[in-house]
Image (tube, grey):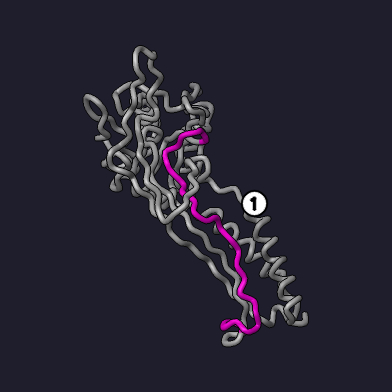
């Protein structure tokens, strides 16, 4: 390849097309767990009311529900991933292997919120949600008392039943029973590789040892997130209009090329640089739609 402006522009255009195609084809896990919010600044503030409470009969004036006094804030974070391609690869017309690396960049960008999701799950037993207590807590305040969305113990038939009971018994902030699935969605059991076998036995085995029917057969979808390194697990509502977590998107992943021959990297290190960048973050949403366990 003759290294001139036209050739480098053609290579950059090709790399960008490869990136966009791979990004579109990626199938990360996180979209089913989140409410997507498009952000317009460095952060966003959320005031949660009793979103899951039911309708009331209209007698007299409307009853206006107050939103939370203290805002729950999610700050956007900046992300990047960059690779360098030797100029010799262009001169020798050997860019095929680097197209594969561009595809990998797209996969990394698409899956990155999955990593943030796992950070939220694993950190949810210490980090507060919008009501001022840890997202997974036995002390979520409601009118007249508290309610729990946490279960102790390893994943088993007993602890799964406990989580299912808690999820289906959830109440709104005012203490009124809610239906966590009312806004659409489905039940999903989320585990890491360490719990995959136990989860499959629990949900995918039609008959238990002895021949009796497994009452938990297909009771929930199963999602195995490889970023969960330990025994944490979660039963939650996924795929509905409301979700346990928020994905706050300020700038979607974009592809950027630094491939001018007078760029510093090209002049000093004999390579062209290609990277991706974006701005987003994730935070806690509705704890009433998830029950979690550390697995211990």
Element at label 1: helix
Image quadrant in which the N terminus is located:
bottom right
Q: Which sits in the foreground, 63 or 245?
A: 63
Q: Is residue 235 above or below residue 213?
A: below
Q: Which residues are magenta?
A: 239-266
Q: Is residue 188 left or right of residue 256?
A: left
Q: Which residue is mark 1?
A: 24
Percent coordinates x, y for residue 128 in the rendering: 29, 45
Residue 78 magenta-drawn? no
Q: How many marks?
A: 1
Residue at 40% x, 39% y is 234
Q: Residue at x 29, y 25 (%)?
A: 174
Please report the residue visible at 47 percent of the width from the left and 50 percent of the height from the top.
39
Q: Position of residue 71 (x, y in %)?
A: 32, 44
Quadrant of residue 287 within the rendered picture? top left
Horizontal and vertical percent for residue 240?
Answer: 51, 33
Please state which of residues 66 and 101 is positioned toward the viewer in this rendering: 66
Question: Which image quarter: residue 131?
Answer: top left
């Amino acid at each position: 390849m003759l290294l001139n402006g036209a050739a480098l522009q053609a290579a950059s255009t090709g790399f960008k097309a490869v990136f966009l195609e791979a990004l579109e084809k990626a199938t990360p896990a996180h979209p089913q767990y989140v409410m997507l919010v498009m952000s317009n600044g460095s952060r966003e503030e959320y005031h949660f009311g009793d979103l899951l409470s039911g309708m009331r009969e209209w007698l007299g004036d409307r009853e206006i529900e107050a939103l939370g006094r203290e805002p729950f804030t999610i700050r956007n974070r900046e992300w990047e991933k960059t690779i360098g391609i030797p100029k010799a690869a262009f001169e020798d017309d050997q860019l095929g292997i680097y197209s594969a690396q561009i595809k990998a960049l797209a996969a990394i960008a698409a899956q990155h919120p999955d990593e943030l999701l796992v950070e939220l799950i694993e950190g949810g037993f210490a980090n507060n949600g919008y009501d001022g207590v840890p997202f997974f807590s036995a002390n979520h305040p409601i009118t007249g008392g508290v309610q729990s969305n946490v279960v102790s113990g390893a994943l088993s038939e007993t602890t799964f039943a406990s989580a299912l009971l808690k999820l289906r018994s959830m109440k709104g902030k005012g203490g009124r029973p809610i239906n966590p699935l009312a806004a659409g969605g489905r039940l999903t059991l989320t585990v890491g590789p360490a719990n995959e076998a136990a989860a499959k036995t629990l949900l995918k085995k039609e008959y238990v040892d002895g021949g009796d029917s497994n009452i938990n057969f297909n009771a929930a979808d199963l999602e195995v997130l490889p970023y969960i390194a330990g025994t944490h697990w979660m039963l939650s509502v996924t795929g509905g209009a409301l979700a346990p977590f928020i994905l706050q998107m300020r700038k979607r992943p974009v592809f950027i090329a630094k491939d001018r021959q007078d760029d510093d990297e090209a002049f000093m290190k004999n390579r062209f640089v290609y990277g991706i960048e974006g701005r987003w973050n994730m935070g806690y949403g509705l704890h009433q739609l998830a029950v979690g366990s550390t697995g211990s």
